[in-house]
Image (cartoon, rainbow, N blue to C red):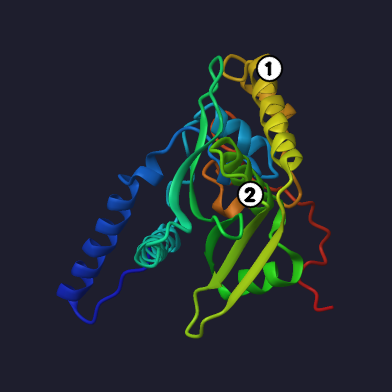
Amino acid sequence: MIATGNDEFSQQLAERIGQFIIEADARSDRSQQTAIGPSEIGNPCDRAIAYKVLDWPETNTARDPIAAIIGTGFHMWMAEKFEQRNAEGRYKIEQRVTVRDGYGTAAPITGSADLFDVLLAANLDWKLVGTSSHDKYRRGGPGKQYRVQAHLYGLGQENAGTPAARVVVVFIARWHELKVHVWSEPYDRQVALDALARLDRIRQQVLDLDVESNPKSWQQIPIVDDASCRFCPWLLPGSTDLSKGCPGLQRERTGYEGLIA
């Protein structure tokens, strides 16, 4: 958080408002969710998934919440506007769907689908992103995590009796000019099933390793080269004990990083 003011009173007020925002976000339903959801299952990092399925204590608690708060507000605004034009029932808005029922110690996997267009048989997911991310997704596609999420919601719609022909991710840039990029593809149940199978494999691995009793066995759960460590809830820079937190990617230094190509 960065809080500034033009005098001492204003400075203190800025700090209080900023802290209020952080604490209010921490108490929100989104922040207190413990069961893994469709938005997290596609995370390419096995170690992050392992921490999540065990509900491991988070270490990166200083993450700035403002982007997520703005995104939540945008989702609420879109839901309201689509409700206003839904007299004929074309849209299913913020519909709770079940991707898979719970079994054993595994909780049900559920999520709130942003919008299902009955006429198009398409499930749409809103993503409010920064301009650099918007350009990245426009050029290179949605990435594994968002693609998996899209098909998991497709499976959730199928389970709800409203099969999706297509899954859609709508990227909208947080910018002073409206920028919208749409990625879509035909719904593929197998993409969702493969993601669930991977989740089950990781869950079984952490149970077999018994990482709670054998902290050193965390080393056997890999981190990927393209992990988004900066935003990971279990990032703990410099950590040498993975049961306390993950240090993130440790790239070998060559001594040439500072040179201009």
Residue picked out by circle 1: 209
Q: Is residue 71 left or right of residue 9?
A: right
Q: Amino acid at mark 2?
A: Ala
Foreground label between 1 and 2: 2
**Label 1: element kind:** helix
Q: Position of residue 182 (x, y in %)?
A: 64, 68
Q: Kindly identify which numbered label has been placed on residue 164.
A: 2
Pick whichever, 178 or 210, lies toward us. 178
- 10 Å neighbourhood of mark 2: few (<14), some, or many (≥20)? many
**Label 2: element kind:** loop
Q: Residue at x 58, y 65 (%)?
A: 170
Q: Position of residue 152 (x, y in %)?
A: 63, 42
Note whether residue 71 is visible: yes
Pick whichever, 246 or 184, lies toward us. 184
In this rendering, is residue 72 above or below 177? Answer: above
Note whether residue 240 is visible: no
